Amino acid sequence: MKKILLLIMITLIHNLCFAQEESLNSKKVVEQFEMFYNQNDYKSIFEMFSPETQKALPLEKISEFLSGLNAKAGKINSREFIKYQKGTFALYKTEFEKITLGLNLSINDNSKINGIFVKAFVDESIPKIERNITKLQLPFKKEWTVIWGGDTKELNYHVESEMQKNAFDILITDKKGNSYKTNGKLNEDYYAFGKELFAPCDGEIIKVLDGIVDNKIGEMNSIDVTGNTVIIKTNNNEYLFFCHFKNGTIKLKEGEKVKQGQLLGLCGNSGHSSEPHLHFHIQNTKDINSGTGIKCYFEKLIVNGKLKEDYSPIQNDKISIEKK
């Protein structure tokens, strides 16, 4: 699952600013920025830029960036000043209609914007957790194959995302390494499609998203990225994300307690998914756009035919709860 990341960064100033209270200058500029952004008035935002920034970011480019941001995130509902960082960049926790992002603006002495970037907001007040404390079992039966998993970009493209850096994409393959039978043109051709997915531990269901239609093979949903989703919170404040369920198959509701081994739903192909598979990761918040990933270890599992304990799978591992 691709990360949601919008980034433009221009550093044209060198004076450091250590104040952690929002200046009147910053407050005035960001209010104007929000007003023009919500009105889709990108030309007025361009006119707020310093001459150097206008040269580096012509109107066409900034309009393309801001319209893309609006399409993915929606309009700004609210924002909260957090601190100054990267020199004079003011960081705002910004609640857009669809997601929470960090808006960073740098303002010069003439009240002109000379730096801007937008990216996922990481709440530094929430403690980071290096690895799961809760004992986990695999969330499926029989043998599945890890397509993306591990600590390097080569093994796992998720590592570039702060939230999903320890995520897994897992599906079922046959002896030839194929994930489907026949010609692979239908979801039903894929071995993982419709397979049962189970809770790997006790916890509480804090989010259920269902009703998203499964993709046709080769097509992906860029709007509802996680697809049909379940999030489980453990007693150790770990948030377990299960994404891409088959439409209409999730068995639990928000607020329900869940036991290890309890059926969650069926594997599907909803959201930003090119074929039926399970996306699974753990993070320290329930907000997929503002958390930090937690490395996942399973208590006991079979890996490539051998028993492993307290193990974090990597790409190409064939994993199961018990031997065939």
Image (cartoon, rainbow, N blue to C red):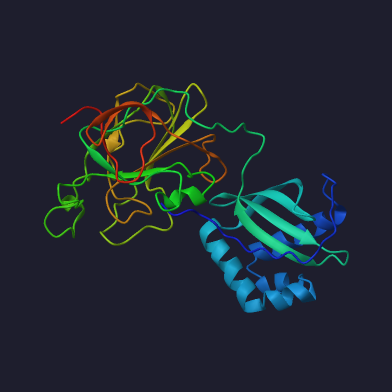
Instruction: Report which quarter residue 297 is drawn in.
Output: top left
Q: Nearer the viewer, residue 269 or 152?
A: 152
Q: Residue at x 51, y 59 (%)?
A: 72
Q: Residue at x 48, y 48 (%)?
A: 159
Q: Is residue 83 left or right of residue 211?
A: right
Q: Give the percent coordinates (x, y) of residue 136.
A: 37, 26
Q: Nearer the viewer, residue 224 or 20?
A: 20
Question: Against 134, is 286 above or below?
Answer: below
Q: Is residue 145 visible?
A: yes
Q: Give the percent coordinates (x, y) of residue 298.
A: 37, 29
Question: Against 181, is 298 above or below?
Answer: above
Instruction: Report which quarter residue 135 is drawn in.
Output: top left
Q: Give the percent coordinates (x, y) of residue 20.
A: 82, 44
**Looking at the image, which residue sits at the far left?**
182
Q: Is residue 20 left or right of residue 310?
A: right
Q: Give the percent coordinates (x, y) of residue 299.
A: 36, 24
Q: Nearer the viewer, residue 179 or 207?
A: 179
Instruction: Report which quarter residue 8 is drawn in.
Output: bottom right
